[in-house]
Amino acid sequence: AVVSTQSTGELLHERDTEITELRDRLENRRPRSSDEGMLGELLDTSDDAPRSLIFYKQQHQYLLEELGKMKQLRETQELSLREKERNEHVYVSEIDKMRQENRRLTRNTSRESANMEYLKNIVVRYLALPNGSERRQVLSAVLTVLQLTPDEMGQVKHKLSPGWLG
């Protein structure tokens, strides 16, 4: 019983010494303002730290790495978003231009359709008329609707007999 009391006393003395050393280490370190600093101090104490502190140190390092990856991913995605927003502006502008062009072409097509119908009616009327002054007037209308160039007009005048176009 004397031996076990003596070894228990020695063991208690060793543990008290370890506790005192740990307290001294903590007091001698510079104070930090955040909880992360306190955790960092505890994790940096020594290699003989208990296993749970080693586990927490590893977890802390892993989480810091993951945080770095997430920050990098966020930055990459923000850059991509900004680029897409710039491109969206260009695409919206192009779409507006295409819509305007589509409306213009639709108007022109409807005008051409109306002009074609008018031209058809004039040609039918021209073909139905006997030779004479009325036929010359209709031919003038046809040439106006066709919007001939001066050269084309000269060719037509040359082919027709004199006096047909006035």
Image (tube, rainbow, N blue to C red):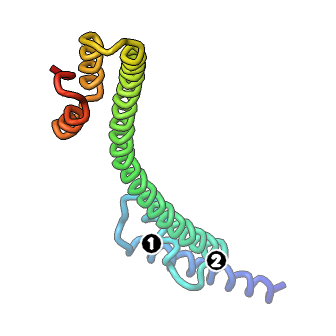
What residue appears at the point 34 percent right and 29 percent down from the top-left corner? Answer: 104
- The residue identified by callout 2 is 50
Specify the quadrant of the image occupied by residue 135: top left
4 versus 141 height, above or below: below
141 displayed left or right of 65: left
What residue appears at the point 40 percent right and 27 percent down from the top-left corner? Answer: 109
- Residue in front for this viewpoint, 29 or 139: 139
Q: Residues within 10 Å of mark 1 (few under 14, many from 20)?
A: some
Q: Residues within 10 Å of mark 2 (few under 14, many from 20)?
A: few
Residue 41 in the image: x percent, y percent? 46, 71
- Residue in front for this viewpoint, 78 or 145: 145
125 versus 10 height, above or below: above
62 displayed left or right of 104: right
Specify the quadrant of the image occupied by residue 155: top left
47 displayed left or right of 10: left
- Residue in front for this viewpoint, 52 or 138: 138
Is residue 77 among the parts visible in the rendering? yes
What residue appears at the point 54 percent right and 72 percent down from the top-left corner? Answer: 61
- The residue identified by callout 1 is 26
- Residue in front for this viewpoint, 162 or 97: 162
Residue 63 in the image: x percent, y percent? 55, 66
93 versus 56 height, above or below: above
Could you tell me the amino acid type at mark 2?
Pro
Q: Secondary structure at mark 2?
A: loop
72 versus 15 height, above or below: above
Residue 162 in the image: x percent, y percent? 17, 27
Residue at mark 1 to residue at mark 2: CA–CA distance: 16 Å
What residue appears at the point 48 percent right and 61 percent down from the top-left corner? Answer: 73
Is residue 114 among the parts visible in the rendering? no
Label whose residue precedes the other's in the sequence (1 or 2)? 1
